[in-house]
Amino acid sequence: MRANHSETVQAQFDAQAQAYLQSAVHAAGPDLLRAAELLSQSFPAASGAVMDLGCGAGHLSFALAPLCASVVAVDPSPNMLATVSRAAAEKGLANIQTVQAGAESLPFEDGRFCVVASRYSAHHWLDLPAALKEMRRVVKPGGYLLMIDVEGDENPMVDTHLQTIEILRDRSHVRDRTPSEWARLITDAGFAEIEHQNWATRLAFEPWVTRMRTSPERIAMIRTVQREAPSELREALAIEDDGSFSMKTGLWWAKA
C-alpha cells in the first residue's frame, strides 16, 4: 500500500536528519541574517516564545534562540527533532525545546507565541492555507509571522520546470509558491503589513540530489530535463552542464 503524504514526509526526512544539519545551503545564508535582524528590530514584541514550524535540523531555531526567551522547534520527523536537541545542547542553547507535530494541526493554545516562523519547509505542506491559519491562531495579537522558503516563478515556463525537477528529486514535494501566491495566502490567513525580500540561492547538483537520496533513475530524468531546457530557461535559472542551477529563496515578514 502506498504511504500517505505525512508518512512520505517523515520517511524522507527521518533518514536524512544529519545530512540537513551539515548542509551548507541550510546552515547559512542571507535569509538567516535577515531573520535575526527582524527579530532584534521587533524587540520587545518579539522577545517571548518563538515557534519554528517544520524546523528540520534546527538552523532557524539556532539563529533565533539567542534573541528570544524560548524557541519551540516543531517537526513531524522524530529523527530531525532528536538532531535539533543534540545540536542545541552542543551549542549551549538551553532555551530550545522540541515538539512532534504536523503544520496543519498544532498542539498549542491560541496566542502562545510572539513569533511564528518557518524556513525551507512550507513547500512540503499538503495544506498550506490551513497551516498558515494555524500559525495565525497560535501567534499573539500584534505578533509576527516569518516565512522563508524557496519560491516558484511568476513566469509559467520557468515555474513548470522548477516544480518538475523538485518533484522528481523529492517525493514529499508539494509546491514552491510564487511571490504573488505567498502574498495572497498570508493575507487570507489574517496577517497584514507584509514585507518581502528574496535572494538567489545556488544549488550544486550533486549535494542537492544526495541530500534527498534521489534514486539514480530520477536523477537521470532530472539531468535530461535540465539538459533539454530551452535557452531562455537555462539562462533564467543559470543551469550548468552538470545540472547545477539557481532559484530564489523568499522571506516574508508580516504582522498578526
Image (cartoon, helix red, strand yellow):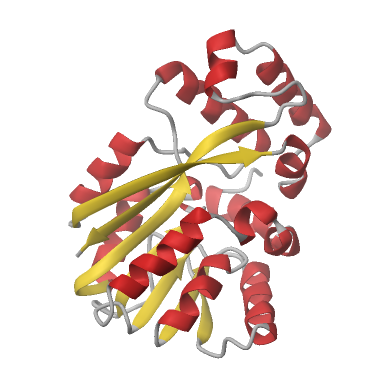
Q: Residue at x 24, y 77 (%)?
A: 110
**Residue 237, x across and y down, in percent:** 56, 25
Q: Quadrant of residue 147?
A: bottom left
- Indicate whether 167 appears above or below 220: below
Residue at left offset 26%, top offset 43%: 183
Does the rendering let one see residue 53? yes
Query: In the figure, 234 relative to 27: above or below?
Result: above
Q: Which quadrant is home to the N terminus?
A: top right
> Farthest residue in the right direction?
216
Side of 124 relative to 81 (left or right): left
Q: Is residue 100 visible?
A: no
Name the image quarter holding the C terminus: bottom left
The answer to whether residue 244 is left or right of residue 125 is right
Where residue 182 sits: x, y (%)?
Answer: 31, 43
Residue 46 screen position, x and y as percent: 30, 77
Q: Nearer the viewer, residue 129 or 50?
A: 50
Could you tell me which residue is drawn at 37 percent across and 35 percent down? 178
Residue 179 x, y percent position in the rendering: 34, 38
